[in-house]
Amino acid sequence: MTRGGPRLLHGATVAGEIRAQVKKDVLAFKRRQGYAPTLAVVMVGSDAPSAVYLQQILRSCRNVGIHGRLVEIPGRVSAAALRNRIAELNDDPLVAGIIVQMPLPKRIPLSAVTDTLDPAKDIDGIHPLNAGRLELGHPGFMPTTAQAAVELLKRSDIALEGRRAVVVGRSNVVGKPAAILLLRANATVTVCHSRTRDLAAETRRAEILVVAVGKPGLIDGGMLKRGAVVVDIGINVVGERIVGDVDFESAKGVVSAITPVPGGVGPVTNALLLTHLMRAATEQAAQTSTPRRRLRQAAHH
Ligand code: NDP
């Protein structure tokens, strides 16, 4: 938009700030409790793209001193056996948070995971209780990707109040919670999806546009309002490259600010997940009836 091109909303800076705080929180937790909190990462089968994502999460955990535990479950697992495994993690006092790789094998209903997870350990906000809390504006865990999109805008000093925001995508994990969070920030929100009659007419009205679809190039420069701020959540593998849902080349001459893909929302998502884990760990440590000495012994075995 400006002669030098749009402002790029890089996630690395925001993610770095968030991680620095998490590191301090982990140190304080360890000093107090005598052990590191654990994030259990459940991998069902060996789906390559999400395996890469899960490895990234485990690496981020290590970097801030959180113990990441990879729980590998064969892809042929039954829904009942998966429920049992999650229930075991729910009961493990060392495990503060649990995330489960998506998508699940087709045979397994999503509810086998969402309804089994202990809401107190559901740090990515997929349990119906946490989804309801988000909707009602009550404290709980919210889906990190949606939170990251809005957090990136807020920490980049982009005003949201009273502004016309359009979200493209209405999944329970990304689009819908992003719309709720924008509404909470007092934006005027429109949600678009695959049945929206004239997508371009909607997106052209957006001062803030958040796109979470999973289709490369779905939104091009001709569909954008001049000076709009665009958050591209999409992650698509095209040949050797990772691209978003917005055609960056045609968008960059129109918008005032845009997230790069990769390097926009992704790093913030990752960092926020760690903050959720620390919150879960702190809340559970305050409530558990298991003596701290026993937890320390178990952690060091
Ligand atoms: P889903 O497939 O669950 O949802 C896609 C949404 O896009 C649906 O609501 C669908 O509409 C809508 N849609 C599909 N086609 C169109 C179209 N032509 N026009 C308008 N809307 C359309 O995907 P997710 O929400 O899980 O993920 C969305 C994207 O975000 C993906 O690229 C994913 O990889 C990425 N992602 C990024 C993360 C990050 O950290 N950056 C983390 C998680 C996801 P309908 O409901 O009508 O079917």
Image (spheres, rainbow, N blue to C red):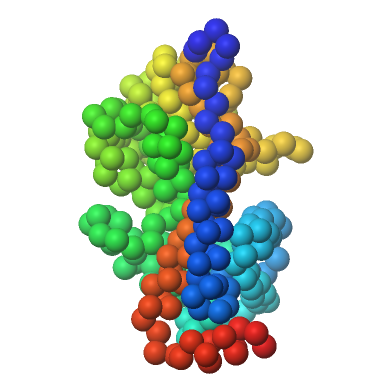
Residue 298 seen in this snapshot: yes
| Residue 32 percent coordinates (x, y) | 49, 75
Residue at screen point 70% across, 66% down: 46
Q: In this view, does 170 lie above or below 141?
A: above
Q: Is residue 296 above or below residue 124?
A: below
Q: How many labels does the image show?
A: 0
Q: Nearer the viewer, residue 273 or 231?
A: 273
Using the rendered view, name the quadrant where residue 209 is placed. top left
| Residue 40 percent coordinates (x, y) | 58, 72
Q: Is residue 293 above or below residue 228?
A: below
Q: Is residue 53 above or below residue 152?
A: below
Residue 194 seen in this snapshot: no
Residue at screen point 29% across, 28% down: 164
Residue 73 placement, left or right of 251:
right
Residue 86 placement, left or right of 240:
left
| Residue 290 percent coordinates (x, y) | 44, 90
Residue 160 placement, left or right of 2:
left
Residue at screen point 56% across, 58% down: 23
Q: Nearer the viewer, residue 128 or 277?
A: 277
Q: Which of 112 and 60 is in front in this view?
A: 60
Residue at screen point 31% across, 68% down: 129
Taking the view exactly as shown, the residue that stands out farthest to the right is: 240
| Quarter the C terminus occupies | bottom right
Q: Which of 237 and 62 is in front in this view?
A: 62
